[in-house]
Image (cartoon, grey):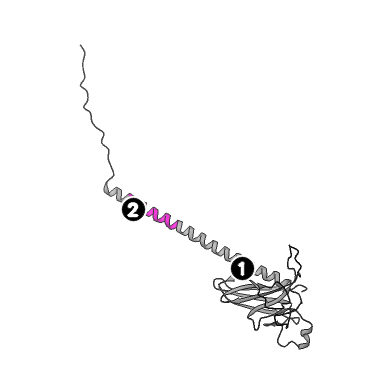
Amino acid sequence: MTCVLPSPRFQPSRQRGFTLLELLVALAVFAIMAAAAYSSLHSILFTEAAVKTETQRLAELQMAFFLLERDIAQAVPRGIRDEYGETQPPLQTGRLLGDLLIFTRAGWDNPLGQPRSGLQRLAYRFEQGQLFRLSWDSLDRGGASKPQASLLLDGVQDVRMRFLNDQDKWDKEWPPKEEAPEAEQKPKLPRAVEVTVVLNDWGEITRLFSLAGY
């Protein structure tokens, strides 16, 4: 005799979902994590931008002081004649033109072998919060000659220069006002030039540059 067992009644599985409170808690945790991640990302991006700006500013300063050091170190006692035929000393402050420093330097590169001198007339000019480097194509200028200007620094509050004479004393102008007229026949150069740059962001920076032969 065969015994047939009754088949069990089918019972569907019961799946439990999230309650409204659990969803709210999950959303709150996600929002907190997203806010923290955004804050960290914003801080990283801000720091990266600040470092990039400071690095670029430092590169500009280094280039400006490098050019100043290179030019001043190669200053030579060679005066010029300006547009009006008047003799100008080899190195002077721009009492009338407003230039900080005007001088003649050697070592002007000539890679193309052009028929010109290796000497060059330069000027450093400060105006409207910017420091410029000016250069002329020729030393003696027979007519109106405009220099080529390149911007070195912006955001500059002030630029000051002092000149160390052969008596180890500092002069604010060059040639010194008390210099005798006959001394102009034998142009002299200072022993060193002190340059102080006051920046809007980095404050006051002072550098001392010696001239060749000292």
User: Mostly what secondary structure, the magenta segment?
Assistant: helix
Quadrant of the rendering where the N terminus is positioned: top left
Rendered residue at 64%/79% (across/down): 99
How many C-alpha atoms fall within 10 Å of the one at disc 2: few (<14), some, or many (≥20)? few
Rendered residue at 69%/77% (across/down): 102
Percent of width and height locating residue 213: 78, 73
Which residue is nearer to you in this view: 30 or 8? 30
Percent of width and height locating residue 181: 76, 88
Rendered residue at 27%/48% (across/down): 20
The residue that label 2 is drawn on is 28
Percent of width and height locating residue 80: 74, 78
The residue that label 1 is drawn on is 61
At label 1, which amino acid type do we have? Leu
At label 2, which amino acid type do we have? Ala
- In magenta, the rendered stretch is 26-40
Residue 139 falls in which quadrant of the image? bottom right
- Whichever of callouts 1 and 2 sits on the residue coming sooner in the sequence is 2
Which residue is nearer to you in this view: 96 or 32? 96
Separation of residues labelled 1 and 2 (CA atoms): 49 Å
Rendered residue at 33%/53% (across/down): 28
Secondary structure type for disc 2? helix
Residue occupying the far top of the picture: 1
Quadrant of the rendering where the C terminus is positioned: bottom right
Q: Is residue 73 left or right of residue 97?
A: right
